Image (spheres, rainbow, N blue to C red):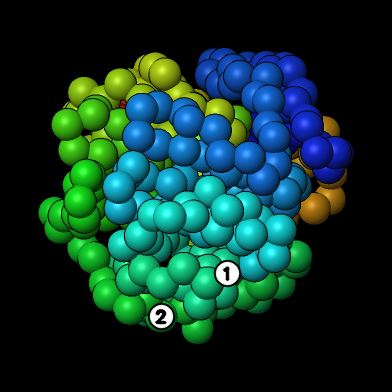
Amino acid sequence: MNSPAMVPPPRRVSGAGTSKPKKSSVMSAELAFNRNVDVDYGVADEIVPGVRRIVANNPGPYTFLGTNTYLVGTEEIAIIDPGPEDATHLEAIERSTRGQRVSHILITHSHRDHCDGALPLQRRLGGEIVAYGPAGSERGAFAPGLGDGLGDGFVDAAFRPDATASDGDTVKARGFALDVMHMPGHAPDHLCFALMGERTVFTGDHVMGWNTTVIAPPEGSMADFLGSLERLAQRHDKVFLPGHGGRIETPRRVVRAYMTHRIWREQTILACVDEGVNTIPHIVARLYGGLGAELKVAAALSVLAHLEHMSARGLVTAEGATEGLSAFYTRAASAAGSGSGAASGRASS
Ligand SMILES: [Zn+2]
């Protein structure tokens, strides 16, 4: 994870410049993001033909300039991610859809910055709320001790859609059709939506334009995340419209960069373990020294996600308290000295 931009909340804002690469003795694969995004909160901007974007005014270390709400269609409208429960934002959506029928309110995943506005928006505009399913049904939405912004304050475990959608389903109304893709990893219920005939995908928080995606167990799963990236890498899309940040015009390159970044991060963690840096707090201090305390929580969970994934593949062994962040990690005997071979393992294992 790069150091996210801390963004002030004036009405018109730009993101900070691209992040500085960090040095690593293993290999360097930090991602360069375009954070020069202009935002007019409350204004519906046409972002590709037939798709408008309104950015919610909830900037922060996990949300960049705010949550993107997309209005899809020109006759009937699907709203993708209503965003937080923020009256000004909901009013802006209402204003921008006046005279149009809202057929669907689609939720990429049940994190509060994406779904909290769903019910209040439905009360204003109607529309069927569609999502993968109730949250918290899989790996468990409640992760203790994650602080603000992650854990149960982050996941709406009580969220219930009107209708569930799963991989391969199509959501359609007059003027548009969206293919549903289940893309777990950041969240177990994460969906992406592909606009049929347009090579445009709404990627939610699976792939973002401003930062790497936080994978925070138990909500997040690195194996699932890499599998979902692999699926996107097989496609031939032209534009990604993420849940935070500007549109992504080089989707395949960004997906490959995300994957390379994870391989690199795994290698840096393995190098720590080999050098006797065996606990997550020490690994975080080594790899993310410059991060503030709040973001170090996310960094620790990201390291945990990698170690979980490596444990599952028999590369590392956890000793002691294997729950949470306090285990002691060593190279698994069979994997010791296997070096870069570790990096080729992916979600298939
Ligand atoms: Zn989000």
> In the image, is residue 299 above or below residue 146?
above
Residues packed near mark 2 inside 10 Å, few (<14), some (14 to 19) or many (20 plus) = some
Residue 116 shows which numbered tag? 1
Residue 33 shows which numbered tag? none
Q: Locate residue 98, reporting x and y percent.
A: 49, 55
> In the image, is residue 45 above or below residue 308?
above
Q: Locate residue 324, reporting x and y percent.
A: 60, 68
- In the figure, is residue 133 to the left or right of 79? left
User: What amino acid type should be assigned to the residue bearing mark 2?
Assistant: Arg
> In the image, is residue 156 above or below residue 83?
below
Whether pointer 2 and pointer 1 mark residues with C-beta atoms closer than 8 Å, the reply is no
Q: Locate residue 282, reporting x and y percent.
A: 74, 46
* Quadrant where the N terminus is found in the figure: top right
Quarter residue 61 falls in: top right
The answer to whether residue 130 is seen in the rendering is yes
- Who's the residue at 46% across and 38% down the image? 52
Count the marks: how many? Answer: 2
Tell me how far mark 2 sits from mark 1, CA to CA.
Answer: 11 Å
Q: Which residue is mark 2?
A: 160
- Who's the residue at 85% across and 38% down the image? 10
- Who's the residue at 42% across and 18% down the image? 249
Q: Locate residue 221, reporting x and y percent.
A: 42, 56
Earlier along the polypeptide chain: callout 2 or callout 1? 1
Furthest residue in direction bottom, as rendered: 158
Secondary structure found at label 1: loop
The answer to whether residue 271 is seen in the rendering is no
Quarter residue 343 falls in: top left
Residues packed near mark 1 inside 10 Å, few (<14), some (14 to 19) or many (20 plus) = many
User: What amino acid type should be assigned to the residue bearing mark 1?
Assistant: Asp
- Front-lying residue, 8 or 50: 50
- Who's the residue at 60% across and 48% down the image? 67
Secondary structure found at label 2: loop
